[in-house]
Image (spheres, rainbow, N blue to C red):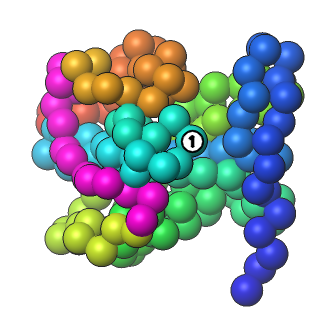
Amino acid sequence: MATRDGDGWVQCRCGGKHWGLNGAAGLLLIRGGKIMMQHRAPWVHNGDTWGLPGGARDSHESVEEAAIRECVEETGINPEHVEVIELFTDNHNDWRYDTVIAIAHGNLDTASWNKETHDIGWFELSEIAKLDLHPSFAKSWPTLQGVVFRIIQSLES
Ligand SMILES: [Zn+2]
């Protein structure tokens, strides 16, 4: 098994402190016009909020590999059902967060989530801002939303 060398905090020039020595990545799955959100367990950092499954990237991983690995660990999905469409990068220079936008195919089973996950839900784009969001996700959502909207439109046409 490859070593996990991405775990740790980065003090960023934006004034924030972020998780992931090589940055972090999350998976945004689209299915039938909805996106999959993770209700984070109360005990994790910024817990009891909704965000994307994801976490620190290891140095030997691509952002896609990191996002999918974390999502598999946290939600139990089968990665064979994930088709990556596009990357959305929030670059802080000292740190970056890559949102891997993907389509969920087939019977994506999320029933075997781990202890970092409190719940999994599928939401329309218009419902997302009403959730109690993870603060970093809340910050990027206004921009990310436009990207996801365009992708959903192109899938439906
Ligand atoms: Zn920062």
Residue at the spot 36% in from the left edge and 21% down from the top edge = 145
Above or below: residue 109 compared with residue 157: below
Residue 132 picture quarter: top left
Above or below: residue 75 compared with residue 39: below
| Outermost residue toward the front in this view | 43
The residue that mark 1 highlights is 45
Residue 150 visible to the viewer: no
Magenta span has 52? no
Whole-percent x and y of residue 123?
18, 36
Is 10 placed left or right of 33 in the picture? right
Q: Secondary structure at mark 1?
A: loop
Whole-percent x and y of residue 42?
41, 46
Above or below: residue 99 compared with residue 4: above
Residue at the spot 24% in from the left edge and 33% down from the top edge = 152
Residue 142 picture quarter: top left
Whole-percent x and y of residue 109?
23, 71
Amino acid tagged 1: His
Residue 84 visible to the viewer: yes
Q: Nearer the viewer, residue 25 or 7?
A: 7
Q: Nearer the viewer, residue 109 or 150?
A: 109
Magenta span has 118? yes
Identify the magenta region. Answer: 115-127
Above or below: residue 28 compared with residue 4: above
Whole-percent x and y of residue 108?
24, 67
Q: Nearer the viewer, residue 116 or 56?
A: 116
